[in-house]
Image: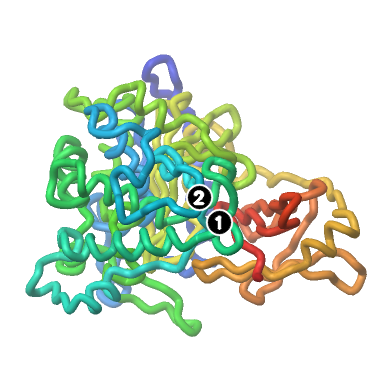
Amino acid sequence: KTAEYRGGYMNRINKANLILAENLVEDIMDKFEACGIAAAIIDGDGNTVFEKFWGVRDKESGKEMNGDTIFGIASVTKSFTCLAIMQMEERGILDLDDPVSKYIPEFTNKNQDKITIRHLMSHAAGFFPLPRILVNQVAETLGLDESVTGDFAYHDGLAQEGIRLIAKRLDEQTKENGLNGKPGEYLSYCNDGFCLLSDIIRRYGGEPSFADYLIKNILKPLHMDRSFCDFLRPSLDENAATLYKKIDGSMVGHRNYHDNALVLNGSGAMKSTLNDLKKYLQMYLNLGRTADGTRILSQYRVREMCKPRQPYNGNGYYGYGVSMKNMDDLTIIEHGGSLTGVSSHIAWSYEADAAVIVLCNTSGVPVSLISDGLMKVYNGKSPVEKRDSWQETPWSEETRHSAARTYVSGEGITVKLYLKEDGSIGLTEDEKEKPLITVSPYTAIVRNPYSDLFLRLISDEERGIFAIAYGSRMIPRRR
């Protein structure tokens, strides 16, 4: 049993729990056919307490990963976006309570109460998830060729057209069709809101692009030299992960980092490495200061990022670009990311004075479970503790009949609640049956192989049950 101290806290990793965690990773890799996984635990001094690589970065060549292998990190980008916004607030460039329309006049906010920057940072602007406006599609309509114009992450004309399209679409949302409530009323995970934030950074951050702002103000001060928003650079880098996704039952790999990428970068365009993300998380553990003493953000504003703002995912809260939850005797601050060939997760705990990073180059792998397991191991707990047992509480007949509808997300997920022959409620996701346990008058648990997903019925007097909160998403009832 190891015992390493920093600031009075003990690293409680023991061999038995570590073996269980490694077995968990191998089980997940096998079940989800993950090509490669990289994981690490660091303490607040930046020391690597644990690091391991499973699988390879490219199946065809068999090339292995290391700490400098580039992965996509998808929605982990949102923490970078909010960090940049908080820097700009600290410098007096903007106020979080300002209306978004003050900075993006294309967004008139005509069908909704005032939406502020603060609302966007916690997914509380009132928008349901929407179909993705993709970088390649917009570039094609503009006749842009990346080999001529340079990387799309830095192209100002592309960003201008992207914000025009996104602002127009958000302005078209109404209470009757597209808005879930007043600003601040509900959390509804929406990538478009973070696209708006990235354009505020592009316009007012003092750099030519959102990508340039991150490089100058976050990545270079942290010496994150292999992190960026570029689309072409990882495809050309010999030590970048091949992206894998199952298509028609077969795992298919490619190195097209444009795949399913949004036209604006603030929601999910970042790429990074295990070693670079260690520096990023050490900065948060030290409340905004880098290893060499450079201050990236004040302690106060780091705490503001990590403060609970909106209920999230059944048992946690969302702050600004990060979420938080209780796990054992720790508060965990975290964010995950999912994209074609990307499953990523970062997490840290001030009580543990430790952070976890898990990166994978395969779609749909539940790396958050690996992250939780490694944090438990660091805290001296088993990573595979018994799952919660839920007391079933049947929904009323009226609730079951009202809830039995189809709910369709703009991101492509279809959830159907239906009445079974015995009158109980059942659920399918994209036509696949899922085990459902109703646990309170308006909530239920969806049992997945390794974890539970929360479902909550959303209703008001005027619309009745008009949506479900399904994990991190709010999904509207089909009209």
Farthest residue to the bottom: give it: 248
The earlier-in-sequence mark between 2 and 1 is 2
Q: Quarter of the image holding residue 356?
A: top left
The span from disc 2 to disc 1 (Cα, nearest Å) is: 8 Å
User: Percent position (x, y) of residue 158?
Assistant: 21, 65
Three-letter residue code for mark 1: Leu
Q: Which residue is mark 1?
A: 179
Residue 36 is at least partly visible in this image: no
User: Percent position (x, y) of residue 250?
Assistant: 45, 82
Q: Which residue is mark 2?
A: 112
Q: Nearer the viewer, residue 196 or 420?
A: 196
Q: Name the side, left or right, on which 173 lies relative to 102.
A: right
Residue 192 is at least partly visible in this image: yes
Q: Which mark is residue 355?
A: none
Q: Nearer the viewer, residue 211 or 203?
A: 203
Three-letter residue code for mark 2: Gln
User: Percent position (x, y) of residue 72?
Assistant: 31, 59
